[in-house]
Image: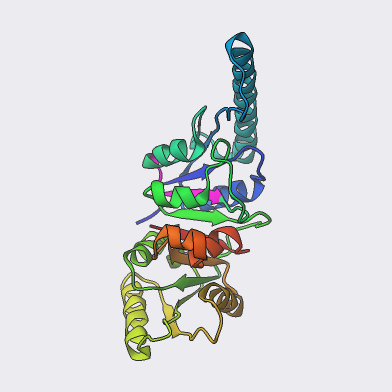
Amino acid sequence: MTYATVMVSLALGQPNDARLQVAGELAERFEAAIVGVAAARFAPPLYFTDGIAAQRLIDQEETSIKGRLAGLETQFRAATKARGGRVEWRSATDFPARFVAAQARCADIVVSGGQSPAFSDSFALASPKDLVMQAGRPLLVVPDGIKWLDLRSVLVAWKDTPEARRAVADALPMLRKAKDVTIVEIPEADGDHAVVAERVSDVAAWLARHGVTATARVVEAANETADVRLEGIAGDVGAGLIVAGAYGHSRFSELILGGVTEYLVTQSARCVLLSH
């Protein structure tokens, strides 16, 4: 398995430099094509007029959106100008998450920016929380300020769920290039430590059969929430990338109560590969 096509989702009114840098670097590492995508659409005001004035407003806003999308294309092409013919741009006046998720059919992995915990504008931004649920592809979330994809140390946040299994399989191309890989599971309060240790050992053995040497660890929560504990472990091992399954619990409960996925998408300072 490899990444033959890397897709990068750009957003209006958001910094795009970090995700462009990482997507370009990822494409170079795997000799992959790179596809840039962006979409936005007119968001009607709460108090809307009608008739000729309404149509004039719609036309003005749609023209503005098309111009801003053209600006994103210019930024994308400037960032990928050295890649020759293996570059493609796609854009539309559409809901961003819907458009990007549809275009993901031609990609092996989608690169997106992170976001703050505040609710995002679905008319202008493809939220990574929506993309990971809808795209059917692994999502690499790149926080602002990241300069490169650091694969010297990778942390696999294991939980015995279908989402985590899928994430590790999706991350195999990166894990093969990593210098150090650590698999860690943080047991539930009433979890059997021996059973948990057997699970992470199984994952390490599976990775070994795919040419990846990994260290398996079981780490107690130590009176911390799982997200805080995970971030501490990532710091301890110097992880430049965290691999995790997205929304192993219901997404609604994570949105309301918080959870590891929400933390990784909105607050982590590291790149995160998520699969659902």
Q: In which quadrant will I find the C terminus? A: bottom left
Quarter residue 244 falls in:
bottom left
Residue located 31% across and 79% down the image? 202
Q: Which residue lies furthest to the bottom in this view?
A: 194
Q: Nearer the viewer, residue 111 or 152?
A: 111
Measuring from the top left, give residue 217's x and y in whole percent.
45, 84
Residue 160 part of the magenta segment: no
Magenta residues span: 106-112
Q: Where is residue 150 in the image (x, y as percent from the top left)?
A: 58, 64
Give the quarter of the figure containing the N terminus.
bottom left
Residue 258 image offset from top left, x and y in percent: 52, 65
Asked where in the image residue 236 lies, by quadrant, the reply is: bottom right
The vertical placement of 162 against 60, above or below, is below
> In this orientation, which residue lies closer to the viewer: 74 or 152?
74
> Tell me, what colour scheme is on the image?
rainbow
Q: Does the magenta stretch include residue 108?
A: yes
Where is residue 177 shown, x and y percent of the image? Answer: 47, 65
Picture layout, residue 263 above or below residue 14: below
Side of 48 relative to 137 (left or right): right
Identified at 62% across, 18% down, the residue is 49
